[in-house]
Amino acid sequence: MLNIASIKKLQIILILILLINSCSRQPEQKIYKKFRILMDTIITITVVSPSEKEAETAINNAFSVIERLDKSLSSFSPDSDVSKINHSAGIDFVKVSTDTYQLINAAIKSAQISDGAFDPTIGPLVNLWDIADIIKPDAHISPKLPALNKIKEKLMFVNYKDIIVDDHDMSIKLRKKGMAIDLGGIAKGYAADKAVAALKASGIKSGIVSCAGDLKVFGNKPDNSNWLVGIRAPRGKLDDLIAVLSLKDLAVSTSGDYERFFIINGIRYHHILDPKTGYPANGFQSVTLVNEQGIITDGLDTAVFVLGPKKGLELVNKMGLMAYFVYSDGSIYITDNLKKLIVPNDKKN
Ligand code: AMP
Ligand code: MG
């Protein structure tokens, strides 16, 4: 039997439960997304936030970080760090921004780790092949192979060991006139790292920064599940995926022979060049790497692509990276540590 005292006790407990509930009810977390064209590609930033205003401020802060980076690295702008370094090759040191300094040091590390398969002084060869310009829709240039003697000439200027770094005042010099750095193989992974750091500094707990083939996710979706990231089928249409990964706090980078290429006499010539031969590297259609840091996944996806299946896998294992390979014959290899992140077919929808 309930007496008056116990009814009052129950009432108090009920009121307390209601109070606790109303205090702990969080505002609804929503997904906000914006894109901008920067670093010669479409960059998309997605965040989870309880407020549109907070989301917008955080996304704008992150875009400012990428914009600053783009200004330092763009080879189109004559007063970027990269243009100044290339114009002063063989002449003088150039004082650079912290971003450029960090990125060049990371690029040199990728070159050392991969025994020069990744080489940030690939610029003269990239310019000679000119694939990016040839494939522009409004270019009207027919694809043409560079002459072998020209390739040999440019190869003499490709060697990361000829980048001189003065740590004391963050300045860089290229030893020989005619050298040129190209950070296109590592800059987007670095940009993803920096943009995620900027979002976190603005109070965002969860989101995705996607810079074409390089992206980084952090935290969870509003329903607490992981972010899903697709790997493109190299010979499929834009939205054909060969796998979907379920990720939290990880970066993913893909180097693919389908991103920038032309075909002559049935042979595909693409934008990832082997610094030993001066020709596009063969052995893979795509290399996808997963790791905590975008600067690692981006620097090394290009390196592994150039190294080819055997040496590439040795590097992946040595560095403890997760990898998804599509070999040049279309067959697939997935490292054991990545298999557990692949979403089974029946759970994709
Ligand atoms: P990714 O998609 O990360 O493999 O980057 C490809 C870009 O890296 C190319 O468009 C070039 O700008 C640059 N690149 C090409 N070959 C190399 C190489 N062997 N080492 C470093 N960068 C390269
Ligand atoms: Mg790369």
Image (spheres, rainbow, N blue to C red):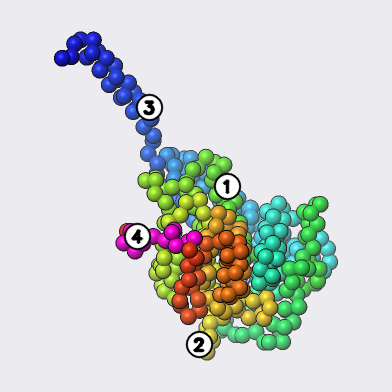
Q: Amino acid at mark 2?
A: Gly
Which amino acid is tagged 3?
Cys
- Which residue is most to the bottom? 265
The reply to whether callout 4 and callout 1 are in contact (CB within 8 Å) is: no
**Residue where numbered disc 1 is placed:** 197
> How far is mark 2 from mark 3, CA to CA?
66 Å
Magenta span has 342? yes
**Earlier along the polypeptide chain: callout 2 or callout 4?**
2
The front one of 307 and 266 is 307
Toward the viewer: 297 or 154? 297
Distance of mark 4 from mark 1, alpha carbons?
Answer: 29 Å
In the image, farthest residue toward the top: 4
Determine which of the numbered discs, if any, sits on residue 348 in the image. 4
Mark 1 or mark 3, which has the lower sequence index?
3
Q: Secondary structure at mark 4?
A: loop
Q: Is residue 335 magenta?
A: no
The earlier-in-sequence mark between 4 and 1 is: 1
Q: Which mark is residue 266?
A: 2
Kind of residue at disc 1: Ala
Question: Label 2 crowding class (10 Å Cα cut-off): few <14, some 14-19, many 20+?
Answer: few
Position of the N terminus by quadrant? top left
Foreground mark, 4 or 3?
Answer: 4
Q: Which residue is mark 3?
A: 23
